[in-house]
Image (spheres, rainbow, N blue to C red):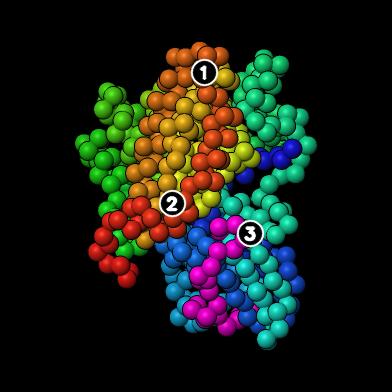
Amino acid sequence: MESISIFDIFKIGVGPSSSHTLGPWKAAQDFIRNNNLEDLSRVQIHLFGSLSKTGLGHATDKAIILGLLNHSPETIDTSSIDEIITEVRSLNKININGRDLEFEYERDLIFESTEHTLHPNTLKFCAYAGTKIIAEQLYASVGGGFIETENGAQSSETKTLLPFPIEKGEDISRYTKEQNCVISEIVYRNEMSMQSESKIDEKVERLLDVFLESIYLGCTTDGILPGGLNVTRRAKNIYSKLTNNASFKNRDEWVELIKESPKDFNSVNKWVSCFALAVNEQNAALGRIVTSPTNGAAGVIPAVLMYYLIFCDYKGRDSVKKFLFTAGEIGCLFKKGATISAAVGGCQAEIGVSSAMAAAGLTEVLGGTADQCLMAAEIAMEHHLGLTCDPIKGLVQVPCIERNAMGAMKAITASNLALESNADKAIVNIDTVIKTMWEVAQNMNTIYKETSEGGLAINLPVINPNC
């Protein structure tokens, strides 16, 4: 049975897209690290399908260059990205494995007009010594920053025999009943079979730090998002109104200000939306975020987690682990049973999955049973079924940023409904909704799968179509 760590579902990376930015970035790194390029004189990259159609809007070109330069998406100074790309393009040179090579952007990044049978998000690297090809590799960016090669090898996944192998929701339900425990405990035992307790704690702290930092930066940065749509950042304005422009010196004081703000329904609703918008405005600006389980849906989990930290009965760091472990395992279920790639399943595979994850995580930390957590996840996905991916100009901005706010609110509603319900009487279970989501994905018209060839992407006039 396929084993996936929740730290494969939650990846620290750079926006705006996990499948179109983070995946190609990692593929480029994998190619230069795992091929004999001693005589390399030139490299060409072919982009197919959705990667070709929306690659420029998703910064796929930039991601590939950064990957070939072997920058890490986890550690790169995101403010330096534009300078790095400008230098490569202006000099027509790229440094690969310590060697300066000729690299002509328009010649060596090829946006193919055709699909590829491997996957809707396929790219091919060709390494040359003179005119001779010395290495060639196909990659599929299958969603959430996961990449596969032609033989199906998934470089991000952990190959470990877990004490509690999980393929379906019914496995989770059975284990938790047998062990008389909650979902996070089963997930924790699985994680302990892959890494030490100290490493797990370190990773959780790092995730929480990036979650908070992405919200904080999004709430304190204004201006226009890059890409040409002239989308105005809104999170800072919402934050300022909610706090009456109160001043603060650092992130800790900023959090305390939010804790002291009014907690009526309307205010909390605005806060949750603000948190989600903040993260995805950072994502759209090539900022650092946590893929949860994708970049386009990166705002849902931190928004709902922040809702719990600020407006609920927060019980300390252990509850953060419980939230993330439970949410992460739900993401694993969808990856195994359906897809987390919008190019395969539409936005239901991104916002829908993230909302289901957040709903389950919130339900556990609010005292729900394992079956109530699964019920919450099912409710959240049930009401995202069929959601299309139709980004205007291929940018992860409209309608993507607002959808994160909607997904976060649906997650909270789903959790509340599950907590007030008898899960044994649920009409639809999590496995049924995952199966249904996959069927919907397979039957959805291709133009609604991250191609920018349908829906809002073609029905909204763009002021500057050439930008």
The foreground one among 404 and 339 is 339
Q: Position of residue 286 (x, y in %)?
A: 43, 57
Neighbor class of circle 3 (other Cα within 10 Å; few <14, some 14-19, many 20+) is: some
Q: Is residue 195 left or right of residue 376?
A: right
Please identify the quarter of the rendering in which residue 166 is found: top right
Determine if residue 304 is in view.
no
| Labelled disc at residue 448 | 2
Which secondary structure, mark 1?
Answer: loop
Which secondary structure, mark 2?
Answer: helix
**Distance of mark 3 from mark 1, alpha carbons?**
38 Å
Residue that numbered label 3 is attached to: 118
Neighbor class of circle 2 (other Cα within 10 Å; few <14, some 14-19, many 20+) is: many
Residue at the (52%, 14%) spot, across then down: 425
Residue that numbered label 1 is attached to: 426
Sequence-first disc among 1 and 2: 1
Residue at the (31%, 30%) spot, across then down: 269
Determine if residue 421 is in view.
yes
Dot 3 amino acid type: Leu
Sequence-first disc among 3 and 1: 3
**Distance of mark 3 from mark 2, alpha carbons?**
19 Å
Above-or-below relation of 82 to 200: below
Magenta residues (range): 98-121
Dot 1 amino acid type: Ala
